[in-house]
Image: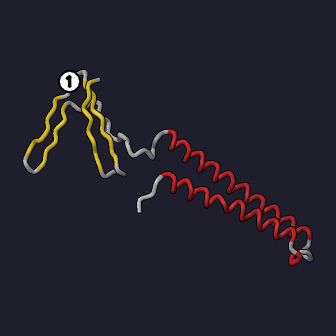
Amino acid sequence: MNKSRFDFEQEIMDCWKVVDDIDTLYEYFGDSPDFVDMPAKYGDKISNLMLGVKELYNIKFNKLFNTFEQLVRDQQFSQERTDVDVAGITRVEVIDENGRQYYKMREDEMSVELSYQDQGRTLKVFVNPK
């Protein structure tokens, strides 16, 4: 199954729920009669540890989500991307089992652009005047 950046975003958000889970435990620990007889110094220590873990994971998930947002802004999830530096290409050729099907020498006023589409299953080569 192919996943998209939207699936990735949702999975990040689902993981972030651990912060809410820690809040739930913290509230349960503070409100439950099961812990009433616990010495205060232990209760305070456990509460402080839970709050520390909650804050730590909140920081980590914020950092992760900021990275995700930067990747989206930089179009790192785009299906149309150019991973190859085409600036030095001087000619374009397409060759199949029957030989050369397309040939074009690059002129000064010409640009070459590669586009990967359909989740990387299609490669398009655009040879255009500048």
- Number of numbered discs visible in the structure rendering: 1
Please identify the quarter of the rendering in which residue 26 is found: bottom right
Please identify the quarter of the rendering in which residue 29 is found: bottom right
Q: What residue lies at 29% left-to-right and 23% top-to-bottom?
A: 130
Residue 63 % position (x, y): 62, 48
Say if 108 sits above or below 96 in the image: above
Q: Which residue is mark 1?
A: 107
Residue 55 in the figure: left or right of residue 105: right
As drawn, the residue found furthest toward the left would be: 98
Say if 84 sits above or below 39 in the image: above
As drawn, the residue found furthest toward the top would be: 109
Residue 77 in the figure: left or right of residue 14: left
Residue 67 in the figure: left or right of residue 20: left
Which color scheme does this rendered protein use? secondary structure
Residue 86 % position (x, y): 29, 34
Task: Determine the secondary structure under disc 1.
Answer: loop
Residue 4 % position (x, y): 46, 54
- Label 1 crowd (10 A; few <14 / some 14-19 / many >=20): few
Residue 76 in the figure: left or right of residue 66: left
Residue 5 % position (x, y): 49, 51
Please identify the quarter of the rendering in which residue 112 is found: top left
What type is the residue that disc 1 sits on?
A: Glu
Q: What residue lies at 91% left-to-right and 73% top-to-bottom?
A: 39
Q: What residue lies at 82% left-to-right and 66% top-to-bottom?
A: 27
Q: What residue lies at 37% left-to-right and 42% top-to-bottom?
A: 80
Quarter in which the N terminus is drawn: bottom left
